[in-house]
Amino acid sequence: MPIRFGVFELDIRSGQLRCEGRKVKLQEQPFQVLVMLLERPGEVVTREEFTRKLWPDNTFVDYERGLNKAINRLREALRDDADKPRFIETLPHRGYRFIAPVGDGVLASSQVAEHVPLTKSTVSGIPRHSDPVEQTIGINHDTSPPNGAAQPQGQTDRHLNLFKIGAKFLFGTVCVAALLLVYVRVRPHVQQTAAVTPIPFTAFPGLEAAPTFSPDGTQVAFAWTGDALKSKGFDLYLKVVGSENLLRLTQHPSQFIYPAWSPDGAQIAFHRISGSDTGLYVVPALGGPERKLRSTHINIETSAIISWSPDGKWIAYSDSLANSRQERVNLLSLETLKSNQLPHPTDCLNEGLPAFSHKGNLLAYNCASKPLEVRIYTVAIEGGTPKLIATFSGWASANAWTGEDSRLVFTVDQGKGNELLELRLANGSLRKLPFGEGVSWPAISRKGDKLVFTVSSNNINIWRKDLLHPGWEGIKLLASTREQTNPNYSPDGKHIAFESTRGGAREIWISDSDGSNLTQISRFNSNVVGTPRWSPDSRKIVFDSWRTGNGEVYVVDLTELIPRRLVTNVSGMFQPSWSHDGKWIYFLSGATDAPRIYRCPANGGNETMLSSEPAFGFHESFDGETIYFVDGWYDARLKKISLNQIGPALPVEGVPLLKDASLWTVDPGGIYFVATAAPHSICYFDFSSRQVLRITDVDRDLNSMNGGLAVSPEKRWILYSQVDDISSDIMLVDHFH
C-alpha cells in the first residue's frame, strides 16, 4: 500500500514517488533517504545511520558531502525548504526527522527493499575507472577498495566536535596513539537512547576530572588544576550537588589524582601520580592530613583509577610489575595494607580501570591483549576465574556500574572524540548515551539515579621555530580550532604531512612548507589514521589506520590520492616509515605481544623482525646502518640496534629519559628530543661530542604521544605540536536511568 504524506505518495515496491498522481523523478540515494525517514516518522535518523545504509562497508567516499547532496535532492523533489521545512527537519550535528503526518501504508523495516544496489559508478565523489583500482600492494593482492579510503577531490563539511583531553586507556606496552571503531564480539548494533539533558556541575577555569560520588550521592569529589595554563598540577576538591562552595582536600599539586569514597563517606582514597610521591593515599572527607597507604609505579592518568569495595575492606588499583612496564590489577587490604594480585588471564598483557559493583560481589576491569584491543572482564571477589564480558577496540577511560549492577557505562574514543556507551552484561548489547563527544571519566551514584562525567576540549597546533635563531618567538604554522599533530617534512623540503581533526575524524593532510595550500589526503571518515611519513623521493606517504580494529599500513601516491594497503604476513601494523634508500618500509607490530620493530619490502612481502625487545617509537639513522628506538610510552630510554649484524640492543649513553615515545627525531649529526626532566625544552644530543645541548624552549605544553618533532632537510626549521588551549568541565545528569 502506498505511503501518503501531503500531496505525495510513495510506493516502496515499485520504487516510485508521485505528486498528485504525477511521477516525480528521484535518484537512488535520495529515495533510500526518504524510505529511512518514513520508516520512523517523527524520530531522528542520525547521520551515522544514513551513512551505514547508503554506503556499504567496502565503499570509500566523502560520506558527509554525499549525504548532504542526497538530502538536498530529496528536498528539491519534495519542494521543501530547509529553513521552513514541511517534511524534513534538520537537527544540527545529529541528523534529520520527517515531521509531516504520514497516512495509509504502514512502513516496516522488513518491507524496505534494497531497490537499486549502489556501485562505485553511482556513488557521488568516486572517480570512475574503466578497470578496477588495485588497493593493496604486496603479497595476496586484493582488488577491493578499503572502507573509507582517500579520494582525490572533495572536502567534508563535518561539524566541529570538542577534542578529548580526558586521559586515555594506554596500557603500558600495548596501546598506540590512534583512534578506533567500537565492537563487541559479534559487533552488536549500538542503539541511541532517549535524550537526557546534562547540566554543568563545575565550570571553573582549567581542568576538572575524575569525579566520584559520595555514598549518599549528595557530594562529588574530583581533581582540579585551577588555571590549566598556569597550574602546577591537580589537587583534590569536594563540592556538594546544588552548591558552588568548594572544599580543597589536598595541597600537593600533582600530575594526576583519582579519588574513591569510603562506603561510610568518612574518607576519600586517592591515587596520586607525582614522581617519587606516586602512590595510594586517604584523607578525611571533611578535611585533614592525608595518609599514604602504599607507593606505586605508574605514570599514565588512567592507571590511577581506583575503586573502594562496598564492604570497606579493599581498594582495587593498578600498578606496574617489578622491573616491567606491564600493569596488573591488585587488591589492597585496608586491614593489613598487604596487596594481592587478581587472577590473571593468560593472554592479558596489561590490566586497569577497576570498578567494584554496588553489591560488592564483582569487580570489573579492562585487559589489553594486543595493540588497541581492550577486553572487559568481571571477577568474583570471593575467588573465581575472570569472565570475559566484551571486547572492543580503542581507548577507554573508567568503568561505572549502573545502580542495579546489570550494566556498565564507559567511554571509548572512536576517532572522533570519546563517547559514552552503556553495555548490558546479560547479552553484550550496547547503547550510545546521548551526551556527544569529548566525554570521559564517567561515575554513577550508588542509587543509580545520577551520572557525572567530564567534557573536555583543547586546541593543538603545529608551531615552527628557527634553529638558526632559537631565541626568536615560534610561529604558529598549521592551526585550526581542532587538532594538528605529528608533522613530517618531505625530503625535498617542499611539503609537510601531518594529522588533523579539522574535518571531523582524524585524517592525513599535507601543506606547502610555509603552511599554505592544505590538502586532505585520507578520507576514511571513521576510526583513526596517523603517523604520516614521506618516501625518499617525496612522491608517496605511508601511514597507519585502525579502521578494521587491527592495525594496517597504507601507501598513497600523491599523483592519484588512492591509499593502497601494504600487504605482508604480519598483522597489527602501525607507525610505519620508509628506509632512506626507499627499499624498505619499517613498522611496529604487536599482534600477540608487546610491539617490536619489523620491516618488509616497500612493495609488500614477507616481514623481518628487527628487534627482540619491545619498541614504542623508532627512527632509522641517515646512513641506514642503525635503528634507534625507545622502550616505553613515557619516561622512555633511548636504545639502538645495528642493521648490519645481529646483536642485542644497546642504550644510547648520554641521552636522558625521553618525555614520551613521539617527542624525538634523528638527523645526520644527532638526535632532537624532549626530556622528562625538561618537558618545555627541545634539546639536542650530538653524536660526535656525546653532549646534550638545550636548543630552545616552548611556551606551553607539547602534545604527548602523537605530537612529534620534525626538522627540515636544510636543518633550518623545527616543527612541534603545542597545546594552545585546554579546558574541561564536569557535567551532571540527574534522574539517570
Image (tube, rainbow, N blue to C red):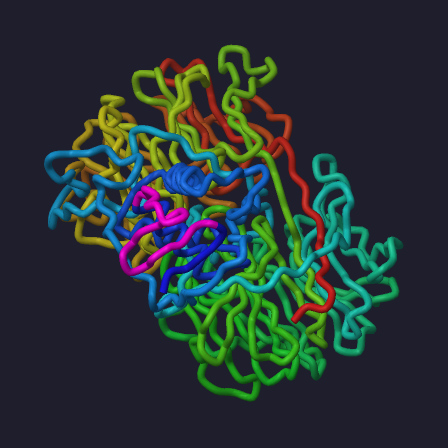
Residue shown at 68%/46% (left/top)?
A: 728
In this rendering, would 477 be left or right of 528? right
Expressed as whole percent of the image width and height from the top left, the position of residue 693 reads 52, 24
Indicate the quadrant where residue 314 lies.
Answer: bottom right
Indicate the quadrant where residue 522 lies.
Answer: top left
- Mark yes or no: residue 349 visible: no
Residue shown at 83%/66% (left/top)?
A: 285
In this rendering, would 261 be left or right of 82? right
Residue shown at 55%/15% (left/top)?
A: 470
Of all residues, the one furthest to the top in this rendering is: 468
Which of 709 and 135 lies nearest the eye of the viewer?
135
Indicate the quadrant where residue 727 lies.
Answer: top right
Quarter of the figure that contains the N terminus:
bottom left
Picture mark count: 0
Relative to 92, say whether 264 is above or below.
below
Which of 419 and 541 lies nearest the eye of the viewer?
419
Expressed as whole percent of the image width and height from the top left, the position of residue 544 reads 33, 43
Quarter of the figure that contains the C terminus:
bottom right
Which of 466 and 37 lies nearest the eye of the viewer?
37
Expressed as whole percent of the image width and height from the top left, the position of residue 399 reads 57, 66
Q: Is residue 8 magenta?
A: yes
Residue shown at 55%/53% (left/top)?
A: 99
Which of 121 and 581 lies nearest the eye of the viewer?
121
- Mark yes or no: residue 182 visible: yes
Expressed as whole percent of the image width and height from the top left, the position of residue 614 reads 35, 52
Q: Is residue 393 magenta?
A: no
Of all residues, the one furthest to the front in this rendering is: 21
Residue segment shown in magenta: 7-27
